[in-house]
Image (tube, grey):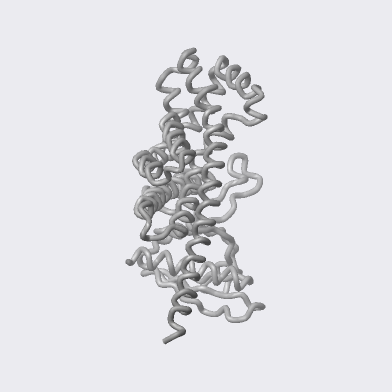
């Protein structure tokens, strides 16, 4: 019985030490968040002050064009400014609460970014006065050699940082704290918008891959650009003929719903020397994938793709390569049948 107060004291010391550790980590994170917020705000200010506001006043760009290039950047700047003021005063909870009400603007900024880049390039090509204005502004000492193109992607990079800062703060905040719920809500809001932005980026990258493959193919007979289609992988494989003929080396493109077999056009062809001719399109929804062999590194491997009216045997001398193709094909077929 006499030991129990000592045990209690030891336990309370451990709890207090843990809380002190949390507080130290939390203070460091809050300090870093404020310091990086100031730097981010400075960079946004360059764009808002030296581009958006002056361009509005000068009328160098039509309002619709200005809106397309810069999107909701002023709203992003305003939200960051308010957050910065709250952080300076140590009002983390209210600061995050206010930020969460405006965080969706980052999603809209991401949605607009592709069109913004296109419009910016177009204006630089066509609009001589804007081209001259841009160069003049970027030569100001405040820009330190940075271009407008370097500054416009910053909000989407900052969103990713917010997610990690807010999560670190939450992990080092006691669940009993008044700020815990506000932090949890901020983490949830930023994570949701981050997922939204990631989806936009993935869809854009996928569209570029589909367009690239479409341009590689001779003619327009095979339509690659189809809504809902996802690019998965590509590579050279050997086709094993059914009647003991020579192996045929073919370039395959795997998408979420089809597999395309192609071969290079003749190198001396005037128009298509760098293109590929489509030889066959295999729908994956009725495909059965089997690994025939591929257990030893030296032998490579062989895949059997069974379709209702055809069986395709594909071979590679690289076992890792054939394993990767097997995984990609089986995953694509499984996804289609799910």
Residue drawn where x is 59% and y is 53% of the image: 264
- Is 275 on the left or on the right of 171, as rendered? right
Q: Nearer the viewer, residue 175 or 159?
A: 175
Q: Nearer the viewer, residue 13 or 337?
A: 13
Residue 188 locus on image (x, y percent) = 37, 53
- Is 178 on the left or on the right of 134, as rendered? left
User: From where the camera sits, is residue 127 visible?
Assistant: yes
Q: Quadrant of residue 101?
A: top left
Quadrant holding the N terminus: bottom left
The residue most toward the front is 2
Residue 35 locus on image (x, y percent) = 56, 41
The residue most toward the left is 338
Q: Nearer the viewer, residue 41 or 82?
A: 82
Q: Is residue 262 above or below residue 319?
A: above
Residue 328 locus on image (x, y percent) = 48, 66
Residue drawn where x is 44% and y is 49% of the image: 198
Q: Is residue 7 above or below residue 321?
A: below
Residue drawn where x is 40% and y is 22% of the image: 64
Quadrant holding the C terminus: bottom left
Q: Is residue 323 above or below residue 272?
A: below
Residue 234 locus on image (x, y percent) = 54, 58
The residue most toward the bottom is 1
Q: Nearer the viewer, residue 158 or 334?
A: 158
User: From where the camera sits, is residue 192 visible?
Assistant: no
The tally of labels here is 0
């Amino acid at each position: 019985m006499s030991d129990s107060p000592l045990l209690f004291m030891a336990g309370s010391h451990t709890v207090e030490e843990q809380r002190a550790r949390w507080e130290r980590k939390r203070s460091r994170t809050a300090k870093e968040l404020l310091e990086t917020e100031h730097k981010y705000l400075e960079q946004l200010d360059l764009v808002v002050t030296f581009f958006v506001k002056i361009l509005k006043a000068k009328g160098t760009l039509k309002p619709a064009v200005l809106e397309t290039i810069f999107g909701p950047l002023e709203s992003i700047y305003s939200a960051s400014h308010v957050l910065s003021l709250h952080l300076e005063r140590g009002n983390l909870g209210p600061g995050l609460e206010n930020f969460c009400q405006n965080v969706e603007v980052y999603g809209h900024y991401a949605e607009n970014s592709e069109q913004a880049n296109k419009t910016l390039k177009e204006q630089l090509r066509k609009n001589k006065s804007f081209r001259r204005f841009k160069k003049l502004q970027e030569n100001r000492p405040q820009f330190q050699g940075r271009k407008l193109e370097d500054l416009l992607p910053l909000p989407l990079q900052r969103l990713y940082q917010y997610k990690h800062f807010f999560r670190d703060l939450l992990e080092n905040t006691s669940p009993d704290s008044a700020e815990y719920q506000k932090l949890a809500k901020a983490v949830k809001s930023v994570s949701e918008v981050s997922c939204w932005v990631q989806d936009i980026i993935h869809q854009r990258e996928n569209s570029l891959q589909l367009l690239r493959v479409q341009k590689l193919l001779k003619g327009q007979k095979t339509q690659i650009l189809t809504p809902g289609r996802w690019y998965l992988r590509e590579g050279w494989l050997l086709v094993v003929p059914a009647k003991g003929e020579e192996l045929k080396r073919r370039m395959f493109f795997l998408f979420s719903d089809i597999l395309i077999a192609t071969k290079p056009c003749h190198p001396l062809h005037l128009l298509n020397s760098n293109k590929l001719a489509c030889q066959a399109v295999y729908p994956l929804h009725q495909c059965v994938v089997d690994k025939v062999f591929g257990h030893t590194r030296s032998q490579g491997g062989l895949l059997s793709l069974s379709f209702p009216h055809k069986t395709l045997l594909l071979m590679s001398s690289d076992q890792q390569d054939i394993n990767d193709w097997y995984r990609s094909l089986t995953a694509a077929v499984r996804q289609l049948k799910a």
